[in-house]
Amino acid sequence: MTIEKILLAKPRGFCAGVERAIEVVEQALTTFPGPVYVRKEIVHNPHVVSALRAQGAIFVDELTQVPEGSHTIFSAHGVSPAVHATAKERRLKVVDATCPLVTKVHVEAKRFAREGYTLFLIGHEGHEEVEGTMGEAPSDIHLVQTVEQARTVRVEDPEKVAVITQTTLSVDDTRAILETLKARFPALVTPSKDDICYATQNRQNAVKAIAREAEVILVIGAKNSSNSIRLTEVAEGAGRLAYLINEASEIHPAWLDGIRCVGVTSGASAPEHLVQEVVAYLKRFGAARVEEVELVQEHVNFGLPAELVQPSTCKT
């Protein structure tokens, strides 16, 4: 078997929200006296979590596992008001690493609910971002995961409805659900700006670009990473074989039989060194050419929370 070329999608890998969340943990570990706890995975990637754990971060599933008064970080996916309330009860010193684009969706949910709207949240049940967003107005939000659900969901007042979305969805799938909702509810109000984040859109478009030539596309990301799963689906939607892998060791040589061109991308939580390890693995099969297909340059940066800029203000 001989691979002639590797196409690397660009943009790929870390987005601004992930970079910020990782920096929040790293800065907290050097700023505050330990221990520093992190509720859930700071981002959905085991390599990132392991690296931060090695630096001293303690990851927990629930705040009840955190000693009262301790420094605690909330993940990039956001949390519900109930989690904030528990943190306050336990006098935790909280640093919130929620991605600002997720925070935007939380703000929209609260505003729409306050104005008397029933909300449709397009997203995936069980995802931490969805749980956090629904917690802002649990009695006013209907989760819609599929076009079929969009066709059947019912509300008391169809003239007072609005829609928000999880930030890491497939642009194409979301569009189909949204169009179905708009057809059923002509008065549907949408946010002034798209909820699906810029990085998700850019990475999906980059996959479509390499899919024009690549016969197989390898998506590097964790199995619980929503945006990585969506990248795999986008590649398959473009008519290509696609595999979601956490690292190079998960590649099956049989996937590469008879393949001339392999495409590689990575989800927004996947470190770049994993991409380079995959490239090195593929070169063992003869790939002499590695080309980046750059669709757009990203220049987005998010500042750190105030608690890390002014540590004395760390809230309880």
Image (spheres, rainbow, N blue to C red):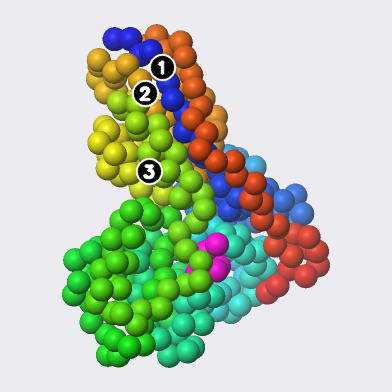
The residue carrying pointer 1 sits among few (fewer than 14), some (14 to 19) or many (20 or more) residues within 10 Å by Cα, namely many
> Which label sits on residue 262?
2
Q: Give the magenta range.
A: 101-106
Q: Is residue 221 above or below residue 43?
A: above
Q: CA distance from mark 3 to mark 2?
A: 15 Å
Identify the residue shown where x is 43% and y is 55%: 168
**Helix, strand or loop at mark 1:** strand
Q: Magenta span: helix, strand or loop, mainly?
A: helix
> Which label sits on residue 221?
none
Q: CA distance from mark 2 to mark 1?
A: 7 Å
> Which of 209/222 is in front?
209
**Labelled pair 2, 1 in contact (Cβ < 8 Å):** yes
Identify the residue shown where x is 60% and y is 44%: 298
Residue under numbered circle 3: 231
Identify the residue shown where x is 41% and y is 17%: 5
Residue under numbered circle 1: 5
